[in-house]
């Protein structure tokens, strides 16, 4: 299996990413780290631990990460994810204790204790923790197998006309991560706006018939209303699990190698992922961008993971 650290800000779609990573046999979850984003660090960390309880996740360390972006003030997404960051279902009291280390230290320790090329980083929130880890111990950069992140967009934004939430909330961190030299695959909005929780998808999840599946159903109900009311979507895009799904089956997402720069100074374009698709990328290009998703097979993986998780 592919060993991953999921760095997340749950978050409705982050919760689904966590369930997919836990329930799929081709992924080994070696740790979960949290980062400020959809809500404050206290809230998203509690949410991660609540989801762990719902899914019966045991034996996986959870570490709390950055409480604010590197440079900019905190910007949360209460309009999309609610006051708790995970509005909709009742969130059970966490039963597992946090790892004592800050997320960046946990990432450094885990990568340095593993073989080179063993650990894949999967950020589904702002990139603050990953940038801090790379600065804390640069020797992790050649040791990490790859970074597969949800964020950005080639032709579309959501937090502004040009920019996606995970990148725009900490563009300095994003610039560090995209420019570090490790392989980075960007699963952006071009891909994840195809991961819609349609009525058929919601019905297939409900048919699993377990408590974790009901929990996801309640998450999707809130998420659908939020996306309908604030973003004009008929069905909500469930972004974050696509990054995990890509690691399970690369044929789910069409990707191309391309140079990617993060806009940090634009008057109207702060946080834009500037992807150069004009020509074939140079041979030494280590960044890739996702462009298309096989949505049916993606959702089949989510339903399969929920089926395997069962009723813990
Ligand atoms: C991203 O922003 C967050 O609100 C979601 O969890 C996802 O990671 C989508 O732009
Ligand atoms: Ca997220």
Image: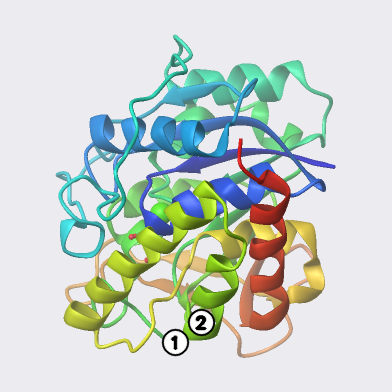
Q: Is residue 195 left or right of residue 22?
A: left
Residue 111, given in percent of the width and then of the height, sits at 69, 25
Picture quadrant of ligand 1: bottom left
Q: Which mark is residue 190?
A: 2
| Residue lying at 52% horizontally and 48% vertically, measured from the top left | 212
| Residue at the farthest top position | 100
Dot 2: few (<14), some (14–19), or many (≥20) neighbours within 10 Å? many
The disc placed on residue 155 is: 1
Residue 283 against residue 184 in the figure, above or below: below
**Residue 14 locus on image (x, y percent):** 45, 52
Mark 1 or 2, nearer chain start: 1
Q: Find residue 5 and report its horizontal and vertical position in percent.
A: 62, 36
Residue at disc 2, CB closer than 8 Å to ligand 1: no
x then y, percent, for residue 295 = 64, 81
Horizontally, residue 117 falls left or right of residue 218, namely: right
Name which residue lies at 74% across and 57% down.
247
- Looking at the rendered image, the quarter that the N terminus falls into is top right
Q: Nearer the viewer, mark 1 or mark 2?
A: 2
Q: Quadrant of residue 82?
A: bottom left
């Amino acid at each position: 299996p592919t060993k991953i650290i999921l760095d997340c800000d749950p978050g409705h779609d982050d919760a689904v990413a966590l369930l997919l990573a836990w329930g799929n046999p081709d992924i080994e979850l070696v740790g979960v780290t949290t980062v400020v984003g959809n809500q404050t660090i206290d809230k998203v960390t509690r949410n991660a631990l609540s989801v762990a309880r719902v899914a019966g996740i045991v034996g996986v360390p959870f570490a709390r990460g950055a409480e604010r972006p590197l440079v900019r003030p905190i910007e949360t997404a209460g309009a999309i994810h609610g006051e708790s960051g995970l509005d909709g279902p009742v969130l059970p009291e966490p039963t597992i204790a946090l790892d004592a280390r800050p997320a960046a230290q946990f990432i450094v320790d885990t990568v340095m204790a593993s073989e080179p090329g063993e650990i894949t980083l999967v950020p589904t929130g702002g990139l603050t923790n990953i940038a801090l880890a790379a600065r804390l111990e640069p020797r992790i950069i050649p040791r990490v197998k790859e970074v597969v992140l949800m964020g950005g967009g080639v032709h579309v934004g959501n937090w502004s006309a040009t920019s996606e939430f995970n990148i725009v909330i900490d563009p300095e961190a994003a610039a560090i991560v995209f420019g570090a030299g490790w392989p980075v695959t960007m699963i952006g909005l071009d891909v994840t706006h195809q991961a819609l929780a349609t009525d058929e998808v919601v019905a297939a999840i409900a048919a699993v018939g377990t408590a974790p599946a009901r929990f996801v159903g309640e998450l999707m109900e809130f998420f659908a209303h939020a996306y309908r009311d604030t973003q004009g979507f008929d069905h909500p895009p469930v972004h974050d699990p696509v990054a995990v799904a890509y690691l399970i089956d690369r044929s789910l997402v069409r990707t191309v190698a391309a140079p990617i720069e993060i806009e940090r100074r634009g008057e109207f374009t702060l946080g834009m992922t500037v992807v150069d698709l004009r020509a074939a990328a140079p041979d030494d290009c280590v960044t890739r961008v996702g462009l298309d998703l096989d949505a049916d097979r993606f959702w089949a993986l989510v339903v399969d993971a929920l089926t395997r998780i069962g009723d813990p």
